[in-house]
Image (tube, rainbow, N blue to C red):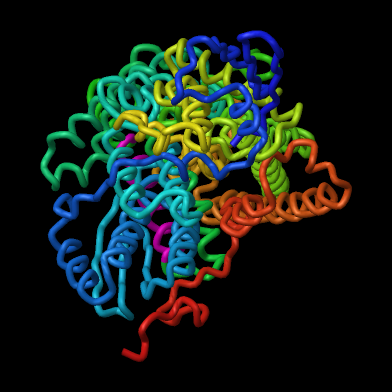
């Protein structure tokens, strides 16, 4: 509850109440006051009292999660657990399984998903274990008495990452009950708590189609030595790839879906090769291929595989690494098939000749690349496309772009600074990748801390959790309230956020009446919509997921298409016996340098391992620096400047805050429980 200040003008009929939130003053006429209304004196006294947060006073309608909406096998396990351990225990297991499935689908990081599951297990003394693999998830409960398996394909979704993590954290922190948590998960899938941009553009077709060409064109320019003509062809290829993926994912039979990568690669090769055939001196096929297929090359998976291997998850890490390597090769081979279709008949050069001829048109020495301003602008455009692919809410794009640009600038500048005679060694690449990853992690941690700090001050006012009022708290509340209104009216924000902000004053007045001895109010009543909005505000008040804003940056730091470039060197090995004489002469005149196909594995290890080490180093540095700053802040008393909560709230946040512990490598993912408190009924 806000610790508000009051100004009372004696001898008048006006009472002005202010909680330092710049809300309109409340005016009452003494002559109109009924016996059931608060007097000025009662209101003034109540404003000085401290109450629990808003959720403790609201009479929420009893919500019961409908078990019949669950799959049949989950219902059977639930029924047995309900009989043996009770309803809450059974529902918590269901919640854990659903959380793991959606997080795995959204970020495909078993280490992070296991961290969330471990928090639930320890908090509620669950006898459950799990095995989260590449696509196969295994859930066990009651010491292996029940086991369910799921095959979950990944589909990166930053908004889902953040929301499902916040729901789990809110439940662990006891801010919502198990029924509310399960219902909230269901409503997320229905789009009730997500941004409009996600519902209509980023998660559905045809809106999603417009992201493909933007990403293909911008990536061809910024990463793969292409020009603006190449970007135009890449945009056409990207749009075509989007249509193919839409058609295959929505209506194609299962055996055709397996061939999606080959089909996308082949059509990309055909379209780009037709353009090259009409003007062979103009187009860089490599940049068109790489830019278009960038959508399907998940370079993040290479880094995640190394992280898992380093963390002891050998089986998952190796499986992921091999799987994504093969996927990259299949896409590259598909593009080569497309080239063969176009160049096999009626063209003066064969496919191999065409590949090396197009290489003469690829160069990084372009005006817009050499100009820092133009290069950053193109990179930001590419970042927008990547954020769209990751279903990042448009209202929060600025967060993702700041992290992406921070990592890219450091990586690019370090690599350029280490360059000698226009060439970088593998060690140069590793150093630039490590420092770029550290910069991205640092930027994401700083940004998450700042955003969390602002939203914490804002949400404490909205949810009546603050027991004090500070000037800096009022300042950030006003800024955040302005941004909530502005983003909504611009069409990017969520209507629920605005409704919660607008109901704050009414909730405050009802709470004062509820706690008054002279008023007959016995409860705070809210509509079903208001109840859902308040619960969304409670969940949104949980800390921001660092990985939801970091993962798009990691995706760009290790473009999977660079790995594909190595595979093209394997598909089209440089052998003078296979190249026609006139093409070979052109290559020698241009001092053409072919990539060494034998370096695929070596370069793959350098790129992915260095970025993985950079992430680990970044989290280690930022976590330790954060702890030091927090220690000195409390010792010096600086935390009192912005703190508006009590010690109990801070302790709860510290105990269950996941951000500073998210990359902890010691995951408890074995059948033996970690401590005695998490063992239940073993003697039965």
Does residue 80 appear anywhere in the picture? yes
Quarter of the image where one finds residue 341: top left
Camera-side residue of 626 and 636: 636
Camera-side residue of 369 and 150: 150
x and y percentages locating residue 650 in the rendered image: 66, 51
Residue at (24% x, 36% y) in the render: 263
Residue at (63% x, 41% y) in the render: 50
x and y percentages locating residue 81 in the rendered image: 24, 71
Camera-side residue of 301 and 599: 301
Residue at (33% x, 36% y) in the render: 336
Q: In which quarter of the image is the N terminus?
A: top right
x and y percentages locating residue 614 in the rendered image: 66, 51
The magenta span reads 316-335
x and y percentages locating residue 82 in the rendered image: 23, 69
Report the side of 234 relative to 457 (left or right). left
| Up-down relation of residue 234 to residue 174 (above or below) | above
Residue at (79% x, 35% y) in the render: 417
| Up-down relation of residue 138 to residue 395 (above or below) | below
Quarter of the image where one finds residue 96: bottom left
Check residue 332 for magenta coloring.
Answer: yes
Does residue 589 appear anywhere in the picture? no
The rendered magenta stretch, by its main secondary structure, is classed as: helix
Report the side of 135 relative to 649 (left or right). left
Q: Quadrant of the C terminus?
A: bottom left
Residue located farthest toward the bottom when viewing the structure as drawn: 683
Check residue 515 for magenta coloring.
Answer: no
């Amino acid at each position: 509850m806000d610790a508000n200040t009051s100004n009372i003008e004696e001898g008048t009929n006006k009472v002005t109440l202010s909680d330092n939130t710049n809300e309109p003053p409340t005016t009452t006429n003494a002559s109109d006051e009924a016996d059931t209304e608060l007097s000025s004196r009662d209101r003034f006294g109540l404003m000085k009292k401290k109450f629990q947060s808003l959720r403790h006073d609201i009479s929420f309608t009893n919500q019961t999660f409908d078990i019949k909406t669950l799959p049949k096998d989950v219902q059977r396990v639930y029924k047995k657990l309900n009989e043996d351990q009770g309803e809450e225990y059974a529902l918590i297991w269901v919640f854990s399984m659903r959380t793991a499935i959606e997080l795995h689908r959204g970020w495909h990081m078993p280490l992070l998903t296991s961290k969330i599951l471990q928090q639930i297990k320890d908090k509620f003394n669950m006898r459950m274990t799990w095995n989260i693999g590449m696509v196969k998830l295994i859930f066990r409960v009651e010491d292996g008495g029940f086991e369910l398996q799921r095959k979950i394909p990944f589909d990166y979704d930053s908004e889902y990452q953040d929301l499902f993590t916040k729901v789990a954290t809110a439940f662990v922190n006891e801010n919502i009950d198990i029924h509310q948590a399960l219902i909230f998960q269901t409503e997320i899938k229905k789009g009730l708590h997500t941004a409009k941009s996600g519902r209509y553009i980023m998660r559905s077709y045809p809106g999603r189609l417009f992201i493909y060409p933007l990403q293909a064109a911008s990536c061809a320019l910024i990463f793969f030595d292409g020009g603006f003509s190449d970007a135009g062809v890449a945009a056409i290829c990207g749009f075509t790839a989007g249509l193919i993926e839409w058609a295959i994912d929505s209506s194609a039979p299962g055996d055709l879906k397996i061939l999606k990568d080959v089909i996308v690669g082949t059509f990309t090769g055909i379209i780009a090769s037709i353009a090259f055939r009409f003007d062979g001196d103009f187009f860089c096929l490599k940049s068109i291929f790489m830019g278009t297929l960038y959508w399907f090359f998940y370079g993040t998976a290479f880094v995640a595989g190394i992280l898992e291997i380093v963390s002891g998850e050998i089986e998952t890490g190796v499986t992921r690494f091999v799987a994504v390597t093969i996927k990259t090769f299949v896409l590259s081979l598909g593009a080569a098939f497309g080239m063969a279709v176009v160049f096999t008949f009626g063209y003066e050069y064969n496919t191999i000749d065409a590949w090396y001829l197009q290489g003469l048109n690829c160069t990084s020495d372009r005006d817009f690349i050499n100009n820092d301003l133009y290069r950053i602008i193109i990179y930001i455009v590419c970042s927008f496309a990547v954020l769209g692919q990751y279903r990042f809410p448009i209202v929060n794009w600025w967060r993702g772009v700041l992290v992406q640009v921070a990592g890219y600038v450091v990586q690019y500048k370090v690599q350029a600074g280490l360059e000698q005679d226009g060439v970088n060694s593998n060690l140069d690449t590793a150093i630039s990748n490590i420092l770029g990853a550290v910069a991205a992690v640092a930027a994401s941690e700083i940004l998450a801390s700042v955003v969390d700090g602002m939203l914490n001050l804002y949400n404490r006012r909205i949810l009546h959790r603050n027991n004090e009022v500070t000037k800096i708290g009022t300042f950030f509340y006003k800024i955040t309230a302005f941004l909530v209104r502005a983003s909504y009216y611009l069409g990017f924000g969520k209507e629920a956020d605005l409704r919660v902000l607008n109901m704050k004053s009414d909730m405050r007045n009802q709470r004062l009446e509820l706690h008054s001895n002279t008023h007959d109010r016995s409860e705070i009543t809210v509509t079903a919509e208001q109840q859902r909005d308040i619960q969304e505000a409670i969940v949104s008040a949980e800390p921001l997921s660092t990985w939801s804003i970091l993962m798009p940056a990691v995706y760009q730091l290790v473009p999977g298409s660079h790995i594909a470039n190595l595979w093209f060197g394997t598909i089209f090995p440089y052998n003078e016996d296979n190249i026609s004489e006139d093409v070979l002469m052109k290559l020698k005149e241009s001092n053409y340098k072919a990539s060494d196909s034998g370096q695929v594995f070596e370069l793959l290890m350098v790129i992915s391992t260095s970025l993985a080490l950079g992430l680990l180093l970044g989290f280690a540095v930022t976590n330790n620096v954060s702890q030091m700053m927090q220690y000195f802040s409390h010792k010096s008393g600086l935390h009192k400047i912005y703190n508006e909560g009590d010690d109990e709230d801070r302790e709860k946040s510290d105990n269950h805050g996941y951000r500073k512990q998210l990359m902890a490598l010691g995951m408890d993912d074995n059948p033996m429980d970690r401590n005695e408190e998490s063992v239940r009924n073993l003697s039965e």
